[in-house]
Amino acid sequence: MNRRRLITLAVAAAGAVAGWFYWRFVGCSTGSCAITSHPVNSSLYGALMGWLVADLVLPRTTKNSSPTN
């Protein structure tokens, strides 16, 4: 695996943990909230947000196949 993918997975995992903590300490007590009423939903949402943030922030590497003259 390349370094960018490992960092993206690590940030997504941190987002999942943050989502679980959000559910645990802030979450919806009535059960009517779609995301924060269940720990799985909150963790998956946090992982998705972490993945998206990492994908936006980390630089992309491009391979130039055309020769430069």
Image (cartoon, rainbow, N blue to C red):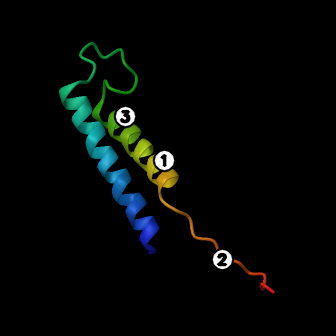
- Label 3 crowding class (10 Å Cα cut-off): few <14, some 14-19, many 20+? some
Residue kind at label 2, given as amino acid type: Lys
Q: Contact (CB < 8 A) between labels 1 and 2?
A: no
Q: From this view, report whether residue 40 is shown above or below residue 29.
A: below
What residue would you read off at disc 2? 63
Compared across the picture, whether 45 is left or right of 38 comes to: right
Q: Tell me the residue at 38%/27% (across/down).
A: 35
Q: CA distance from mark 1 to mark 2?
A: 23 Å
| Front in this rendered view, residue 58 or 35 | 58
Q: Can you name the residue that lies furthest to the left here?
A: 25
Splitting the image into 4 quarters, where does residue 5 fall? bottom left
Residue that appears at 40% across and 38% down:
45
Quadrant in which residue 63 is drawn? bottom right
Quick one: label 1, few (<14), some, or many (20+) residues within 10 Å?
some
Q: Secondary structure at mark 1?
A: helix
In this rendering, the label closer to the viewer, 3 or 1:
1
Q: Residue at x 63, y 71 (%)?
A: 62
| Mark before the other along the chain sequence, 1 or 2 | 1
| The label number, if any, that marks residue 41 in the structure image | 3
Is mark 2 in CB contact (under 8 Å) with mark 3?
A: no
Near mark 2 (Cα within 10 A), the count class, few <14, some 14-19 or many ≥20, is: few
Nearer-N-terminus badge (2/3):
3
| Mark found first going from the N terminus, 3 or 1 | 3
Point out the frontmost of discs 2 and 3: 2
Whole-angstrom CA distance, mark 2 to mark 3, is 37 Å
**Rendering coords of residue 23 (x, y %):** 25, 30
Image disc number at residue 52: 1
For the N terminus, which image quadrant? bottom left
Whether residue 55 is situated above or below residue 63 in the rendered picture? above
Q: Position of residue 69 (x, y in %)?
A: 81, 87
Q: Which mark is residue 15?
A: none
